[in-house]
Image: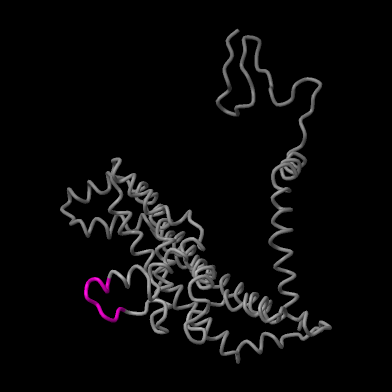
Amino acid sequence: MAATILPHDGVGIRTQRGVADRRSPPGRQRPSRGLSGVLHFLTFGAPGLVVFLVFVLIPIAMTVRTGFTNENPANPPTKWVGLRNYTRLFGDADFTGALKNTVILTLIVTVAANVLGLAIAQMLDRRGRFYNALRSVFFTPVILSSVVVSVIWEAILSDDGMLDSALHSLGVAHPPGWLSDPNLALYSVAFIITWQVLGFCVVVYLAGLAGVPPELLEAAEMDGASRWARFRHVTWPMLAPAVTINTVMLLITGFKAYDQIQVITNGGPGNGTTSTIAFQVVQTTFTGNHIGYGAAMATSMLVIIAVISVVALRILQRREVTL
């Protein structure tokens, strides 16, 4: 028996005996769409929502609440102090210094990783085993632990490390103190973080370059556009989503920087020259036992990251819309 699907509604089957409705088989009622949606949510969405609630929302709520107390295991009892911890932050030289270091480090990492990642992606946007191997080389630091990366670079950049030994062998009597000079240590840490996240930026830009239609580039070339003009007017606008992803991720990475600081410099040299907000939160909370004040710092860091991320996302997405 020949059967065809009706083109106008797609809900019936035309047979030699007429049209049979397949939505409601005789003697059987399908569940309503609302009930079906609830069942789908309970099956697929509820487990994820429970995990998000237990491991993200509840800890954040507890941290915010603790920030309004003077909790300190060495000085009980815990009392509600309102906004006292937050007003104290503005006069805390350690916190404002850590905030300044965090902003500088984040700006360096965001700009350097974006520029270098795009340049390397342009270089690797070719076919061949050699270029595939280079992609793996650049991506390897991303999968390494931050502690491992920090130990490696500490062995290279310390005063008696491999880099200074190489410079001594070349006749440099007094090489820079990459990690011991207070004016240079923060930039050395920024370089290490950039080196570690660079592979992620390269992968995102390679994915963006793969989405650029080659016929647009060929048409621009036939019209006499130079290589720079093709990149500026064709490739760069098409990379707007990749720029958004990389920039937001790098901003968050910079503001969360902690592992490298703890392992390599421990906030020094000197008095907090490489201390970041995340490092200051850990030191205040777990070393100083000022849990309430540390929670206020953590809450402030969360608000700063959220505001900067949302603003950056809005600005960069607006550029995508205008393409």
Nearer to us in this view, 15 or 318 = 318
Tell me which segment is drawn in magenta: 167-175
Left/right of residue 269 with respect to residue 73 in the rendered view:
left
**Can you say which quadrant of the picture contains the C terminus?**
bottom left
- State the residue lying farthest toward the left: 224
Q: Quadrant of residue 25?
A: top right
- Which quadrant of the figure has residue 318? bottom left
Left or right placement of residue 35 versus residue 255 in this view: right
What residue is rendered at 72% in x and 41% in y?
Answer: 40
Rendering colour mode: one colour
Give residue 306's position: percent from left, percent from top: 58, 70
At 56% from the left and 77% from the top, the residue drawn is 277
Q: Is residue 268 left or right of residue 239?
A: right
Most common secondary structure along the magenta stretch: loop
Q: Which of 78 and 283 is in front in this view?
A: 283
Residue 282 shown left or right of residue 122 in the figure: right
Say which residue appears at 44% left-offset and 59% top-offset: 321
- Magenta span contains residue 171: yes
Q: Which residue lies furthest to the top in this view?
A: 1
Q: Is residue 110 magenta?
A: no
Q: How many labels does the image show?
A: 0
Measured as percent of width and height from the top left, residue 51 is found at 71, 53
**Residue 53 horizontal/vertical position (percent):** 73, 58
Query: For the view shown, which residue lies furthest in the right direction?
Result: 77
Residue 125: x percent and y percent? Answer: 30, 48
Q: Is 264 above or below relative to 34?
A: below
The correct choice, above or below, for 234 with respect to 315 in the image is above
Q: In front: 20, or 127?
A: 127
197, 12: nearer the viewer: 197
Point out the image quarter for the N terminus.
top right
